[in-house]
């Protein structure tokens, strides 16, 4: 029941935050936790939503959104850190802000990118049980035209 309510809340949140995109939310499972993450251009954010979270919308900025759920699907707090690197080796440290809305907990960070640039993202998430969840993914980013 709690998991279903949370999934509905996340769906509504993402529905209100983002216009439909080709990117799909991804997840990784670590012992008793799921780490959900997504990377998408900030131009996909509605202006009022970007303002509410103090996120700068720009064709060269992307949003990294991370959330952690326990086995019952309940959102939990975690320590989220990360970095991103392009294929030229230019690295950016990601600074995540924790957002708590009702039962939802998620972590937001911005990164800059060039048109048609691959970003290699590395996330280090310290879970409530102290376990370090390391997630690496890459995504080709495009400027919204």
Image (spheres, rainbow, N blue to C red):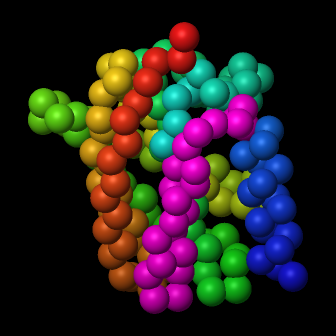
Q: Residue at the location (51% across, 66% down)?
A: 27
Residue drawn at x 61%, y 74% as measured from the top left? 69
Can residue 41 be seen by looking at this rendering? yes
Q: In the visual, does 101 lie left or right of 82?
A: right
Image quadrant where one finds the C terminus: top right
Residue found farthest to the front = 22
- Vertical relation: 100 (above or below) 117: below
Residue at 36%, 82% (x, y): give it: 131
Q: Residue 40, image x and y in percent?
A: 52, 36
How far across and down, in percent of the image, does residue 132 sit? 33, 75
Name the quadrant of the N terminus. bottom right
Name, please, the residue furthest toward the left.
Answer: 89
State whether residue 4 is above or below residue 60: below
In the image, the segment drawn in magenta is 17-38
Residue 10 in percent (x, y) is at 75, 57
Q: Is residue 34 magenta?
A: yes
Residue at 72 percent of width and 32 percent of height = 19
Residue at the farthest top position: 145
Question: Does residue 47 lie above or below 30 as drawn?
Answer: above
């Amino acid at each position: 029941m709690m998991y279903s309510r949370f999934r509905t809340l996340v769906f509504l949140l993402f529905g209100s935050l983002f216009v439909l995109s080709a990117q799909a939310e991804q997840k990784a499972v670590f012992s008793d936790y799921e780490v959900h993450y997504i990377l998408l251009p900030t131009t996909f954010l509605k202006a009022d939503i970007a303002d509410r979270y103090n996120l700068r919308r720009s064709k060269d900025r992307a949003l990294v959104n991370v959330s952690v759920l326990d086995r019952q699907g309940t959102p939990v707090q975690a320590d989220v850190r990360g970095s991103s690197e392009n294929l030229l080796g230019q690295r950016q440290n990601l600074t995540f802000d924790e957002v708590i809305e009702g039962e939802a907990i998620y972590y937001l960070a911005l990164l800059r990118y060039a048109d048609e640039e691959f970003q290699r993202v590395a996330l280090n998430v310290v879970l409530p049980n102290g376990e370090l969840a390391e997630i690496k993914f890459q995504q080709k980013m495009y400027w919204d035209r």
